[in-house]
Amino acid sequence: MEKQSRKQGPTRRTILESGAAMGFVLTAGFPAMGRHMAVAANAPIDTGMTAANAIEITLNINSRNYSLGLDPRTTLLDALRNHLGLTGAKKGCDHGQCGACTVLVNGRRINACLSLAAMHEGDTIMTIEGLAAGEKLHPVQAAFVAHDGFQCGYCTPGQICSAVGMLQEAKDGWPSHASQNLNATTIALTDAEIRERMSGNICRCSAYPNIVAAIRDAATEV
Ligand code: FES
Ligand code: FES
């Protein structure tokens, strides 16, 4: 009996999918949830807020433009996950403490839970869903697989986006707390450097040694 009533109610998936369908209008393709396009066209703004509260913004995510009607308080993380169905970036704390929500904005890593979507009009946003080139994994993704850099996988999208951003920071000569020479233009990515630079990404499965190995490996290819 209990089983039957559960069956009749909306599932977590149907709620998520209908919410995502209502919250956006696609302006240039939509890889993750293309089957919702017809629904979205009929309901361009429905964020669960009154129309008076909603603002319209356009976000460029993984080389596609999305127009959304959003409550201005919506974080970038919630816009990605709840309104666009891009659920790769994870919410581990919503307080900037775990790094599970890390995405790349204009090539730099940020915690999407600490940033309002409305702040990113005109920015170029890259999420874990956009890193691979078709079927070909990004070198950091491939290295995580090769080195078993994950177990449950919950922190992994944030770890990988963070690593991609971190490798660029090192290339650009940004020193870290572990750097001996603050004026060096080239950063040697020692394990100590990698550990320090990745310290904003927590892994409860403690895949850290393999994550370091994966990043050390990928650094030679990126
Ligand atoms: S969810 Fe953003 S840092 Fe934890
Ligand atoms: S792989 Fe499980 S939290 Fe990192």
Image: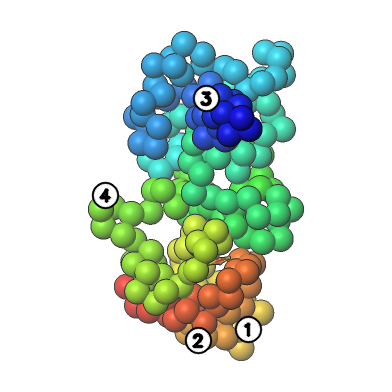
Report the mark closest to the observer, 3 or 4: 3
Residue annotated with mark 2: 190
Q: Earlier in the sequence, mark 3 or mark 2?
A: 3
- The answer to whether marks 1 and 2 mark residues whose Cβ atoms lie closer than 8 Å is yes
Q: CA distance from mark 1 to mark 4?
A: 36 Å
Q: Is residue 26 left or right of residue 19?
A: left
Mark 1: few/some/many CA within 10 Å (<14, 14-19, 20+):
some
* Residue 166 on image: x %, y %: 51, 68
Residue annotated with mark 4: 134
Amino acid marked by disc 4 = Gly
Report the mark closest to the observer, 3 or 2: 3
* Residue 139 on image: x %, y %: 34, 66
Residue drawn at 63 percent across, 22 percent down: 47
Q: CA distance from mark 1 to mark 3?
A: 46 Å
Amino acid marked by disc 1 = Ala
Q: Earlier in the sequence, mark 1 or mark 4?
A: 4
Residue annotated with mark 3: 18
Amino acid marked by disc 2 = Thr
Q: Earlier in the sequence, mark 4 or mark 2?
A: 4
1, above or below 184, in the image: above
Q: Earlier in the sequence, mark 1 or mark 2?
A: 1
Residue annotated with mark 1: 178
* Residue 146 on image: x %, y %: 35, 74
| Most distant residue in the front direction | 1
- The answer to whether marks 1 and 4 mark residues whose Cβ atoms lie closer than 8 Å is no
